Image: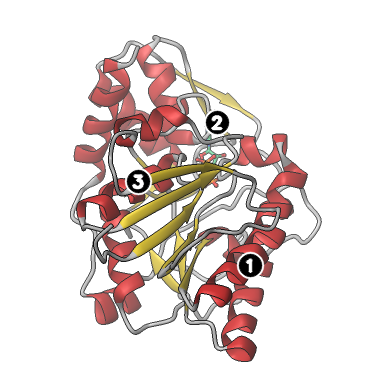
Amino acid sequence: MKKCKTVVITGGAGFLGSHLCDRFILEGYRVIAVDNLITGNMKNIAHLKDEKRFDFLKHDISKPITIPGKVDYVLHFASPASPVDYLMFPIETLKVGSLGTHNGLGLAKAKKARFFLASTSEVYGDPQVHPQKETYWGHVNPNGPRSVYDEAKRFAEAITLAYNRYHKVDVRIIRIFNTYGPRMRIKDGRVVPNFIDQALHGKPLTVYGNGQQTRSFCYYSDLVEGIYRLLLSDYAGPMNIGNPGEFTILEFAQLVIKLSGTKSRIAYSPLPVDDPKQRRPDITLAKKHLQWQPKVGLKQGIKETLAWFQDRL
Ligand code: UDP
């Protein structure tokens, strides 16, 4: 194979991981996707199966990994990422954030590769500072039901920076805010696929609590661009990447109803434990260091996502 750079993507068959596989193939890299398929799906990467520069390895990154040959970048994206998923796989979520990050870092160290950690806005917990800047330490319940994800990702940041300080591994850390788009699992339980699924089936949209909690939704293509730029930049992070447009969940439900043309109504149900009341990224750092900001507004992104799900009904 001619000299192209090799990138290992854990969680490569997942929603974001598979879009990253596409991007790196497009940019001329050799891509090795690693996934244990507990929430990932081979369908997301089926179109890459005849691609010479693409390989898939079914492996749980929470267990040690050996990859022959040179590796230039290790991108650690494996993890359940929906609150419903990580409550269904609590131990796996803790393990992939801790042991999985350790194994990914070990691979990067052995290969002298750059390690890229997919961290999350969940490290800010239920934030008392708004919008959230990278300097904010967060407000996380260390033992509530969401802690399996939040604390695993906080540990992941700590061990990534420890490998950087003590083993001189070159690292980048992104904090990803709510992201949506094609290839999300319709039943993954997150608000975007839930509302779309409900709207397309004429069922009530399940708003949790009074719907006044806020989220900021980033379209996947903007996120992938931010990831690509951060990986190749000189800035180690942590860096927020997300869309600063902030909406209440009720406003979001109304938008999905309007754009889908459904006759669905809204049905209220209880707010999950420790559900963050507000979330919006401060993206000053990304603008400054990556010249990055999102391009796709919520309306356009939801229209495209609705169309994608509609085609697969
Ligand atoms: N949510 C909702 N109805 C749903 C699913 C989620 O009202 O059917 C709310 C949830 O309580 C949270 C927000 O939507 O306030 C975003 O939830 P999601 O599961 O997408 O991810 P989170 O941002 O909480 O990690």
Viewer-proximal residue among 138 and 157: 157
Label 1 crowd (10 A; few <14 / some 14-19 / many >=20): many
The residue carrying mark 2 has its beta carbon less than 8 Å from ligand 1:
yes
Residue 39, picture quadrant: top right
Instruction: Say what amino acid the circle numbered 2 marks.
Output: Gly
Please name the residue shown 62% across and 61% down the image.
125
**In this view, 123 is above or below 143:** below
Query: Pointers 2 and 1 in contact (CB under 8 A)?
Result: no
Task: Tell me which label, 2 or 1, sits earlier in the chain.
Answer: 1
Identify the residue under disc 2: 189
Q: Residue at x 39, y 13 (%)?
A: 264
Query: Can you say whether 231 is above or below 31 in the image?
Result: below
In terms of secondary structure, where does tag 1 sit? helix
Residue 200 seen in render: yes
Q: Amino acid at mark 1?
A: Ala
Picture coordinates of residue 304 (x, y %)? 22, 32
From the image, tell me which residue sits under label 3. Answer: 54
* Number of residue marks: 3
**Residue 75 position within the rendered picture, expressed as x and y whole percent measured from the top left:** 46, 61
Q: Earlier in the sequence, mark 3 or mark 1?
A: 3
- Label annotation for residue 156: 1
Q: Assign the N terminus to one quadrant of the image.
A: bottom left
Q: Are marks 3 and 1 in contact (CB under 8 Å)?
A: no
Front-most of residues 125 and 44? 44
Dots 2, 3 in contact, CB < 8 A: no
Q: Secondary structure at mark 2?
A: loop
Where is residue 227? Give x, y as percent: 34, 63
Q: Of 40 and 110, which appears nearest the observer?
A: 110
The amino acid type, in three-letter code, at marker 3 is: Phe
